[in-house]
Image (cartoon, rainbow, N blue to C red):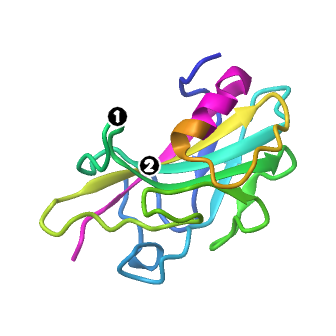
């Protein structure tokens, strides 16, 4: 299938597509993940993974671009939403903050508006991957199993 958006729908009760992410969900607020929901997964979906990535961030390390805010995986196919602050029941990977779990938007001061891509990947099987994978490691493991994917994009600029 490859990494290309499909008909899956990803939404949040916290913000609409291409709208500002509330401060509550940022490093300037409570730093709690927004609620996410998804539907219209491809037939045969057995698991999901979620990634939040900011491609507008300055280069943070050689060989990568942007900044990874969340890597979450080992979600069974029966899970089609995460509540606000949700995700602890599943496996968290390593963010570019150097920790596991959600880390909200916090672009450098004066850097303007950044775009945050909340990706949901539908997989053809449960992989039972170990905790602490980086986004690159996760993508390497799941690439042969991606049936479909899509994203919700939110924006944020430091006050």
Residue occupied by mark 2:
53
Q: Which quadrant does the N terminus fall into?
A: top right
User: In this picture, is 27 found above or below 55?
Assistant: below
C-alpha gap between disc 2 and disc 1: 15 Å
Residue occupied by mark 1:
63
Does any portion of residue 9 appear in the rendered image? Answer: yes
Kindly identify the residue that appears in the image at 41 percent across and 82 percent down: 29
**Going from the N terminus, do you reach mark 2 or mark 1 first?**
2
Structural crowding at the residue carrying mark 1, measured as other residues with C-alpha within 10 Å and reported as few (<14), some (14–19) or many (≥20): few
For the residues carrying marks 2 and 1, which lies nearer the camera in this image?
A: 1
- Taking 85 as reference, is 67 left or right? left
The x, y position of residue 105, in whole percent, is 38, 65
- SS category of the residue bearing label 1: loop
Q: Which residues are magenta?
A: 138-159
Front in this rendered view, residue 14 or 57: 57
Front in this rendered view, residue 3 or 142: 142
């Amino acid at each position: 299938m490859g990494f290309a958006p499909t008909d899956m729908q990803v939404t949040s009760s916290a913000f609409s597509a291409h709208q500002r992410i509330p401060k509550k969900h940022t490093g300037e607020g409570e730093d709690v993940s927004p609620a996410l929901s998804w539907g219209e997964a491809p037939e045969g979906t057995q698991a999901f993974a979620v990634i939040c990535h900011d491609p507008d961030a300055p280069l943070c390390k050689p060989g990568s671009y942007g900044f990874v805010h969340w890597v979450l995986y080992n979600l069974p196919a029966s899970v089609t939403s995460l509540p606000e602050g949700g995700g602890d029941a599943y496996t968290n990977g390593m963010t570019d903050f150097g920790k596991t779990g959600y880390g909200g938007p916090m672009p450098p001061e004066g850097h303007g508006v950044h775009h945050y891509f909340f990706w949901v990947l539908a997989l053809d099987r449960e992989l039972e991957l170990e905790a602490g994978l980086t986004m690159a490691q996760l993508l390497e493991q799941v690439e042969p199993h991606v049936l479909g994917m899509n994203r919700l994009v939110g924006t944020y600029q430091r006050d």
